[in-house]
């Protein structure tokens, strides 16, 4: 609510300012865009129209400022107002479901790249293919569009790539004289040391068993050469019972059974972990770059930026584990009243200037190759660039969300192993059957 | 004048007997229908509301349980008929059978506990002085008045592994006592809300805590209606408390118990909010009950309203059967 108010207030202030600048004209926005020579072709005709934008995640100051600037600039160019609403990540699928069923959805929405196939299959997204045929967007590498493309149409525009790395309490590491772990065993040792010194209720390395658990499990399994499922012909074949995945799964459940993370929090997702981290109850956890800003906000300054740092998740033999290839897209919702204006906004937001700022200010990796080159020189972003080099995606199927989040197939398998109700072999065999069933359903 | 008055009077006189039939005719006109129809007309508004809010959705649910309904169908694409496929699918699913087991076991245990505890407290209330009884009634009724979601939140906090009161209290017990009772002394960080069994333990306590007051107060109301002479006679005959309860209180309160049992069964079969809050949403599949399973199928993405509806139909049918059998039992015993 507060955010919407701020956004509205900002937009109103901007409108007023423009009105004054136009010397008391009764139609300030229209006049203003009329005088702007560089306004896009569709500019004046959008004056007075309103667009609803869903931003995903928590609104930390950096993200809020970027959004305000973007919205103000878009208004200046087209005359259209943009209303911003923030949706926390764990609620995204429920909100989309309600929006698609009830019709009261956004016009433009941010969307996780792995969510695009699902929502595209539910007819919830409107194709925006023409955006990529010319202009700056044509420079976005085609391999970043694989999840977004279906039947020759592109349904979402990559906005920033968000890979995962381990966020840790730098001040604790310094205090306890812990080196940044280079192998998984060193990470385990570091976690145990943190727990010994910081108290039993602190998770050395937090276990993620919630909706986004597969970002962690995936990395650990891929590091061992494992794979969730492979498409053979037009059928998915589960690979959960193969040795590589099994080894990764053992590392994953080991986080709890070795005591690095408490047994009482088996269903926490990265947002729950972040809250505990902000309260000084977690030493390390796997997450994306944007969490730093939110932690600063949530801990009301108690955990500051210089106490935090990232390192790439190490494998057992050393080196960075393949990270989850996440990314945030921006898409036109199929129920948008004015699809032309919505498409215009997507185009505007994914220009080099605004996509570049989106990535750099939001802690993500840029989608434009020239930006990425520059980024590799930045030491703070190096862990992500390194992880990005061998990032992997989860199975690109509309049904993946059901297996990965709703039915939480592997989270449940892990729980049954951790609680000693099944061996890893039994649990994975069962999970494999279920995964195949879900991925192959029509 | 006279004439007119006579006429008038005469008219009045002559119309008096005549007026009766018109009056009754007018009465019929006011309702505009034969007498036998009136009750139905009076029932109509209520029936309409029930039909609109209950019957229509129920029929819709039945229809949907034979269709494949996803987001696309809600957005206007006609739904395909799939026959009994939704049912076949849920009967094959392991989650369905564990949900069914959880639902039934939970209902049996909770109904029993609620009734026993409620009756005991009701009998106790009857023995208390008026002031004390009012005091206790107000106290327990405030537990009953807590909304289901708030009940869930209260017990979730109490059962929290790190900061919960339950673990704190268990740790306060003398070690030898705790060891004797539970075979362990250290309860630090005991995760109550992980495992299906312990989740249901907390859920049972939560639901019993919130629903026994209603039983207690209803039993108290029933007890007030039993003539004191009966108890006097029992006392004179030297009947024990338990015998008095069995031979006098229980038979006389039977109608009350019947209604309370049916209500409890219905309430406990469809418990949802408390479980949802305790588990933090449909996370642990082993701890689903039928309502939770139905919700997870129908509303989590991608929504499968068809199989969600099928589960709801099964739950409804189950509830109808249980209630029907029970009502029959009551009718039968009353005939004897």
Image (spheres, rainbow, N blue to C red):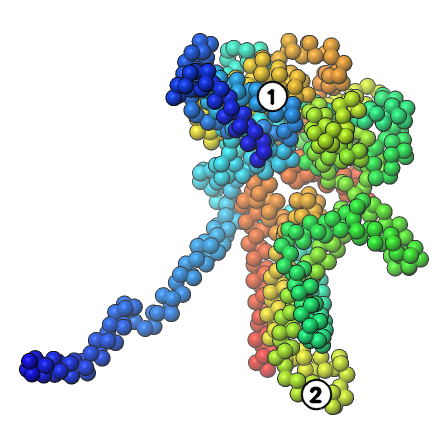
Left or right: A127, with B24 as reference point = right
Percent coordinates x, y for residue A270 in the rendering: 71, 33
Residue in the foreground of this view, choosing between A110 and A43: A43
Is the residue A35 above or below the residue B265 in the image? Answer: above
Percent coordinates x, y for residue A237 in the rendering: 67, 31
Residue in the foreground of this view, choosing between B70 and B55: B55
Residue A66 tag number:
1
Residue B1 in view in this figure: yes
Snapshot quadrant of residue A314? top right
Residue A228 in view in this figure: no
Percent coordinates x, y for residue B189 in the rendering: 83, 45
Residue B232 tag number:
2
Q: Are the residues at dot 2 and dot 1 in contact (C-beta closer than 8 Å)? A: no
Few, some or many residues within 10 Å of mark 1 (<14, 14–19, 20+): some
Residue sitting at x 56%, y 50%: B310
Q: Quadrant of the N terminus of chain B?
A: bottom left
Residue sitting at x 45%, y 19%: A19
Left or right: B110, with A53 as reference point = right
Calculate the distance from the C-alpha at mark 2 to the C-alpha at mark 1: 82 Å
Is the residue B8 above or below the residue B146 in the image? Answer: below
Few, some or many residues within 10 Å of mark 2 (<14, 14–19, 20+): few
Circle 2 — which element? helix
């Amino acid at each position: 609510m507060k955010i919407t108010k701020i956004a509205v207030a900002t937009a109103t202030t901007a409108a007023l300012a423009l009105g004054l600048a136009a010397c008391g004209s009764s139609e300030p926005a229209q006049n203003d865009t009329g005088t702007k020579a560089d306004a896009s072709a569709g500019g004046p005709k959008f004056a007075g129209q309103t667009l609803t934008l869903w931003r995903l995640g928590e609104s930390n100051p950096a993200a809020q400022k970027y959004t305000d600037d973007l919205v103000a600039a878009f208004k200046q160019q087209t005359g259209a107002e943009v209303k911003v609403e923030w949706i926390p990540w764990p609620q995204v699928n429920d909100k989309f479901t309600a929006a698609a069923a009830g019709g009261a959805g956004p016009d433009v929405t941010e969307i996780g790249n792995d969510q695009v196939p699902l929502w595209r299959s539910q007819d919830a997204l409107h194709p925006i293919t023409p955006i990529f045929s010319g202009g700056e967007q044509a420079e976005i590498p085609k391999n970043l569009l694989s999840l977004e493309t279906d039947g020759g149409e592109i349904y979402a525009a990559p906005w920033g790539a968000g890979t995962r790395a381990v966020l840790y309490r730098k001040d604790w590491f310094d205090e306890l004289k812990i080196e940044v772990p280079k192998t998984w065993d060193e990470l385990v040792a570091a976690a145990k040391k943190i727990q010994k010194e910081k108290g039993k209720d602190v998770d050395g390395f937090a276990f993620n068993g919630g909706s986004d658990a597969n970002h962690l499990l995936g990395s650990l399994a891929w590091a061992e050469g494992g794979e969730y499922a492979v498409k053979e012909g037009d059928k998915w074949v589960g690979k959960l019972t193969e040795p590589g995945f099994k080894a990764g799964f053992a590392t994953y459940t080991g986080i709890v059974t070795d005591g690095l993370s408490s047994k009482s929090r088996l269903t926490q997702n990265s947002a729950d972990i972040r809250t505990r981290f902000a309260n000084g109850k977690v030493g390390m956890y796997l997450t994306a770059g944007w969490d730093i800003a939110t932690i600063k906000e949530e801990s009301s300054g108690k955990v500051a930026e210089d106490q935090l740092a990232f390192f790439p998740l190490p494998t057992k033999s050393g080196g960075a584990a393949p990270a989850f290839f996440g990314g945030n897209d921006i898409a036109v919702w199929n129920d948008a009243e004015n699809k032309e204006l919505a498409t215009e906004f997507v185009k505007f937001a994914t220009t080099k200037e605004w996509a570049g700022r989106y990535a750099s200010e939001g802690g993500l990796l840029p989608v434009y190759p020239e930006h990425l080159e520059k980024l590799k020189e930045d030491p703070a972003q190096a862990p992500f660039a390194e992880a990005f080099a061998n990032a992997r995606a989860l199975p690109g199927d509309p049904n993946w969300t059901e297996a990965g989040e709703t039915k939480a197939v592997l989270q449940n398998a892990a729980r049954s192993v951790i609680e000693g109700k099944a061996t890893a072999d039994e649990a994975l065999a069962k999970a494999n059957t279920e995964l195949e069933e879900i991925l192959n359903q029509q | 004048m006279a004439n007119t008055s006579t006429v008038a009077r005469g008219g009045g006189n002559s119309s008096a007997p005549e007026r009766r039939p018109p009056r009754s005719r007018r009465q019929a006109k006011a309702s505009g229908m034969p007498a036998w129809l009136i009750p139905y007309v009076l029932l109509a508004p209520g029936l309409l509301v029930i039909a609109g809010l209950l019957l229509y959705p129920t029929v819709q649910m039945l229809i949907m349980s034979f269709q494949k309904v996803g987001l696309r169908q809600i957005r206007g694409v006609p739904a395909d008929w799939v026959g009994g496929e939704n049912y076949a699918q849920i009967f094959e699913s392991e989650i369905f059978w564990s949900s069914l087991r959880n639902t039934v076991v939970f209902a049996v245990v909770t109904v029993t506990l609620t009734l026993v505890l409620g009756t005991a407290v009701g009998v106790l209330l009857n023995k208390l002085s008026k002031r004390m009884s009012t005091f206790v009634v107000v106290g327990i009724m405030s537990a009953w008045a807590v909304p289901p979601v708030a009940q869930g939140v209260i017990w979730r906090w109490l059962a929290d592994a790190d900061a919960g009161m339950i673990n704190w209290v268990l740790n306060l017990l003398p070690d030898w006592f705790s060891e004797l009772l539970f075979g362990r002394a250290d309860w630090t960080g005991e995760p109550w809300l992980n495992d299906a069994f312990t989740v249901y333990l907390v859920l049972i306590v939560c639901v019993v805590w919130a629903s026994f007051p209603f039983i207690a107060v209803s039993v108290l109301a029933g007890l007030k209606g039993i003539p004191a002479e009966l108890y006097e006679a029992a006392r004179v005959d030297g009947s024990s408390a338990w015998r008095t309860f069995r031979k006098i209180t229980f038979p006389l309160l039977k109608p009350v118990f019947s209604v309370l049992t049916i209500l409890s069964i219905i309430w406990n079969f469809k418990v949802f909010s408390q479980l949802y809050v305790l588990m933090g949403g449909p996370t642990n599949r082993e701890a689903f009950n039928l309502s939770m399973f139905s919700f997870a199928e129908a509303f989590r993405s991608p929504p499968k309203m068809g199989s969600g509806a099928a589960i709801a139909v099964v739950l409804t049918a189950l509830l109808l059967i249980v209630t029907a059998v029970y009502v029959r039992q009551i009718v039968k015993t009353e005939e004897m």
